Amino acid sequence: MITYSHALYAVLEPLLGVFERTGTPREPSGQQAGHQGEQFDVVMIGLGRFGTAIGLRLHERGERVLGIDFNPEAVRRWRNLGLNADFGDANDAEYINGLPLAGVRWVVSTIPAQPTGLSHEEPRETLVQAIRLSGYQGPIALTSHSGRETEDLLATGAELVLEPFQDGADRAVELLAGSKRLSHTSIPPIASEILEQS
């Protein structure tokens, strides 16, 4: 069955519709933008609230940012904000290999820890391996929500680990100590984020 999975799927596809969840976001056909040949400063993988805020601020500073996400709503939001974005799976090594990484100064991933698949692989570790195998030797930044994760992620080869809660606390202390306040970055919510908050 594994060997002939594509052929079997082609035959069974019309019958599988009854198993699909309703309301599942899909990538609109024709929405895959090809960015081969374009030059970017930063490739941002994960376009949730944190990734979008970082992407917008980098864009405001004149950085050329390409965003990647598996959620078509997140990709659509980025494009509506005037940013370059592609629909793609960060756990697909073939997709990562095709990214325009030549000349990129940073690859930043804001995807959280979500063990997936039968082997419960750590997606951020898998991503670092795929990026390195693609030939990219520049710095990689990952996102962590605990000190233990941070140490593990640095051991995978990441040069920087962003800790949103710790970094937010550090910035709050700077503001309380008199640092200049930055302008607020307004991010329109998408359906999946509204569901998370309710």
Image (spheres, rainbow, N blue to C red):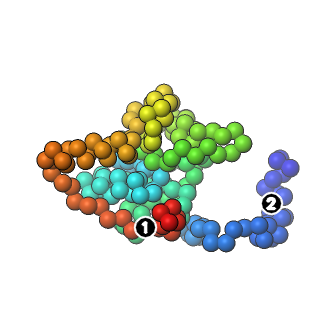
Q: Tag 2: Cα neighbours inside 10 Å, few (<14), some, or many (≥20)?
A: few
Q: Residues within 10 Å of mark 1 (few under 14, many from 20)?
A: few
Number of numbered tags placed on the structure image: 2
Sooner in the amino-acid sequence: mark 1 or mark 2: 2
Q: Residue furthest top?
A: 155
Position of residue 135 measured from the top left corner of the image (x, y, whole percent): 50, 35
**Disc 2 residue type (three-letter):** Tyr
Q: Position of residue 22 (x, y in %)?
A: 67, 72
State the residue at coordinates (55%, 36%): 125
The x and y percentages for residue 61 are: 25, 53
Nearer the observer, disc 1 or disc 2?
1
Name the residue: 81% across, 53% down.
Answer: 5
Label 1 element class = loop
Q: What amino acid is found at the position of numbered circle 1 in the picture?
A: Pro
Residue drawn at 41 percent across, 53 percent down: 51
Q: Is residue 181 visible?
A: yes
Viewer-side residue, 148 vs 60: 148
Query: What residue is at 66 percent from the left and 40 percent from the top?
Result: 120
On residue 9, the disc is 2
191 to 44, vertically: above or below: below
Q: Does the image show residue 66?
A: no
Q: Secondary structure at mark 2?
A: helix
* The label number, if any, that marks residue 88 in the structure image: none
Q: Give me the disc on residue 189.
A: 1
Where does the image place residue 70, in percent across and percent down from the top left?
Answer: 55, 57
